[in-house]
Image (cartoon, rainbow, N blue to C red):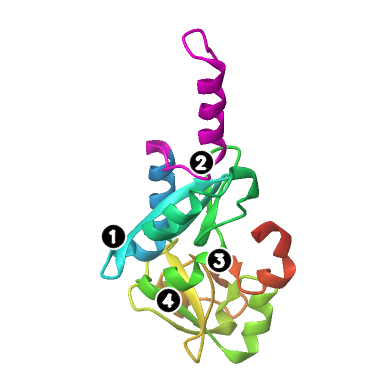
Amino acid sequence: WCFRHSTLGDAVNRVRRLAVTPMRPLTEDEMKAFFEKLTKFVGENVRLLLDRPDGDWCFRLHNDRVFYMSVASLKIASSIPRDNLVCVGTCFGKFTKAGKFRLHITCLDHIAKFAKYKVWLKPTSEQSYLYGNHVLKAGLGRITEDTPQYQGVVVYNMADVPLGFGVTAHSTAECRKLEPTGIAAFHQADIGEYLRGEAELC
């Protein structure tokens, strides 16, 4: 800090203003890493998260986590001291120390709404998936036609309830030829984390 040309009162006011700035916009590099990960699941539908008929929405960074909220909520949150603010809006995920972005299960509802590719589990495989295991061919009920390999997918049960998300280990065509014990989709997140990893989501 350099207060050479400022009075002590000005310095105190400046610190106070910074203290109540709870979150900030993402930098260009952060935005790139975030949207690259998000686009793997929703494709060009990512624009629909911001282009909404119910007002202006935005993404903001707070404590290495990316939050999705309305601009109206952001204005309200701006009056809360940084140290007192836990979260606002929906947490989409967190940046690692290496600068990589990891989606959290808390964004599932938004991803499921705009997902291009989906996987459905047989009832007998739901519990296994909710314990953090990969989706095996034996537990695969359905998969979106023409799904590529290593594509981000939302995982549903047969009643169309979203359970989590992951990445396909094989394309749709390859899954048809896969052995029953072969991995059809890699697990990334599931709603069981609300119990297993509650502390990490907060």
Q: Position of residue 23 (x, y in %)?
A: 50, 45
Amino acid under disc 1: Arg
Q: Which residues are magenta?
A: 1-29
Give the residue number, with chain letter if any, for mark 1: 47
Nearer to us: label 4 or label 1: 1
Q: Where 42 falls versus 23 (above or below)? A: below
Q: Is residue 37 visible?
A: no
Name which of mark 4 and mark 2 comes first in the sequence: 2
* Circle number at residue 118: 4
N-terminal label among 4 and 3: 3
What residue is rendered at 33% in x and 73% in y? Answer: 146
Q: CA distance from mark 2 to mark 1?
A: 26 Å
Q: Position of residue 88 (x, y in %)?
A: 53, 58
In the rendered image, the quadrant that contains the C terminus is bottom right
Q: CA distance from mark 4 to mark 2?
A: 39 Å
Q: Which mark is residue 198?
A: none
Query: Residue placed at 67% from the left, 70% from the top?
Result: 194
The picture places residue 36, in percent across and down from the top left corner, at: 39, 50
Residue at point 46% right, 75% down?
Answer: 175
Q: Which residue is mark 3?
A: 106
